[in-house]
Amino acid sequence: MICFWGQLSFSRQPLVPFGYELFIREGSADNWHVPTDFNRFSAQQIIDLLVKTAPNISKTTRNLSINADVKQFVNPYFYRAFARVGQLLPSVNLAIELTEHPAKNPVTDDELVTAARNYNRSGIHIIMDDVGSGDNQVSRVRLLNPYVQEYKFAIQNFRGKKNFDEILEDLAFWRKEACDHRKLLTIEGIESADDIAALDAYQVDMLQGYFLNQPVYLPTRSEQVG
């Protein structure tokens, strides 16, 4: 059985909840684990779970996002299925987060652009997850910029590899990219009040991290009724 766990993101000023990032897990609230291969879940499985879960969440926030590895992202069956979400969940603003995870088989620029265009046509926003990490480097981000609404910069990907000043240099680059291309920018990996204070000068749009909110199990409608 698959389930959703969700973590809130927060607008920076004022610091209030903006939306949930949804994570697919296997099991239940008390006994769950991270799947070893997200690509084995079909779009229909994910949408069925979303339809059962979203009505509970949308009472507090309409903004939801779901991660997709690049193989899922470019799969026509995947984005055609997600095209129906607007009809199924008219009260929800849905975004797809394209992860930085490398694909086992090469994905062409044409496949990426075609998929991105189709998500947008269906009213689904695209978030470039973990920019500057993995495969979500500058060339891919700029390729998809016409279809992307938001970048996410993950501090946690660089902790232990770079000192904080070096991380801030990377952040400054992506902040400029976001400003130049008129994208929202979220910082992930906020772990302390010191992080928030250090990042305040960068005027990012949203913040996300364990200091602000830890992921929680999101029950389906039938579970909540029960």
Image (tube, rainbow, N blue to C red):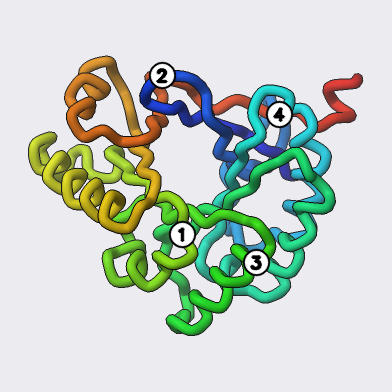
**Mark 1 surroundings within 10 Å by alpha-carbon count, few (fewer than 14), some (14 through 19), many (20 or more):** many
Which corner quadrant of the image does residue 128 belong to? bottom left
Q: Label 2, on which residue?
A: 14
Question: In this view of the protein, which residue sits in the foreground, 141 or 99?
Answer: 141
Q: CA distance from mark 1 to mark 3?
A: 12 Å
Q: Residues within 10 Å of mark 3 (few under 14, many from 20)?
A: few
Up/down of 46 relative to 210, above or below: below
Residue bearing the label numbered 1:
148
Between marks 2 and 4, how big is the CA–CA gap?
21 Å
State how far apart marks 1 and 4 are (Cα). Answer: 24 Å
The alpha-carbon separation of the residues under discs 2 and 3 comes to 31 Å
Alpha carbons under labels 3 and 4: distance apart: 25 Å
Task: Say which of marks 3 and 4 sits in front.
Answer: 3
Mark 1 or mark 4: whose residue is earlier in sequence: 4
User: Can you identify the residue that label 4 sits on?
Assistant: 57
- Residue flagged by tag 3: what amino acid is it? Arg
Nearest to N terminus: mark 2 or mark 4: 2
